[in-house]
Image (cartoon, helix red, strand yellow):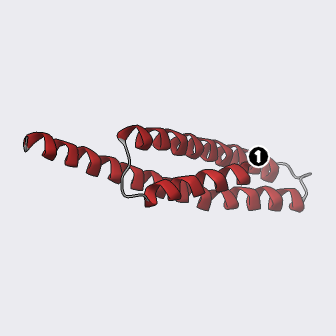
Amino acid sequence: MAHALDSRLTARLREVLARETLTETELRELSEQADGWARTLQAQIHAGERRLARLTADPESRITQIAEELRRVETLRPELEHVREILDELDTRARELRTAWLRAALNR
């Protein structure tokens, strides 16, 4: 389910960023959604890292458990990086929008 959410959100963010015109409200809403997803991914990574620490400290842990958790955490990292890249793009677009608005206001 998390991957489906990530795919849908990422697709929507990319679609909107591809448009020429965006409102500040749209950018703000998208930024909030992307930021929420980034926080969720970060929390999942931290939780996975804590589980890995517990598993590696326990001599009774199976190597398959450790491998599964490590694989899960390592799958989340590129997703988080991708969302952070989108957040950077949204921030750039928001700055461009505000700059254009200020220029237009000054030229009136």
Q: Residue at x 75, y 51 (%)?
A: 52
Count of residue discs: 1
Where the C terminus falls, by quadrant? top left
Question: In the figure, is residue 68 to the left or right of 5?
Answer: right
Q: Nearer the viewer, residue 20 or 76?
A: 20
Coordinates of residue 42 in the picture (x, y in percent): 60, 46
Crowding at mark 1 (Cα within 10 Å: few <14, some 14-19, many 20+) = some
Identify which residue is drawn at 21% across, 49% down.
100
Q: Pinpoint residue 74: horizontal percent, then vertical percent.
A: 68, 61
**In the rendered view, does 100 fall on the left or right side of 6?**
left
Whole-percent x and y of residue 73? Answer: 70, 56
Q: Can you tell which quarter of the image residue 26 is in?
A: top left
Residue at 45% over, 51% down: 87
Q: Which residue is mark 1?
A: 51
In this view, the residue in front, 3 or 44, is 3
Residue at screen point 48% across, 54% down: 16
Judged from this view, the residue extending furthest toward the left is: 107
Q: Quadrant of residue 27?
A: top left
Q: Check disc 1 and give the amino acid type.
A: Arg
Q: Nearer the viewer, residue 56 or 65?
A: 65
- Seen from the viewer's position, the closer of residues 30 and 38 is 30
- What kind of element bears circle 1? helix
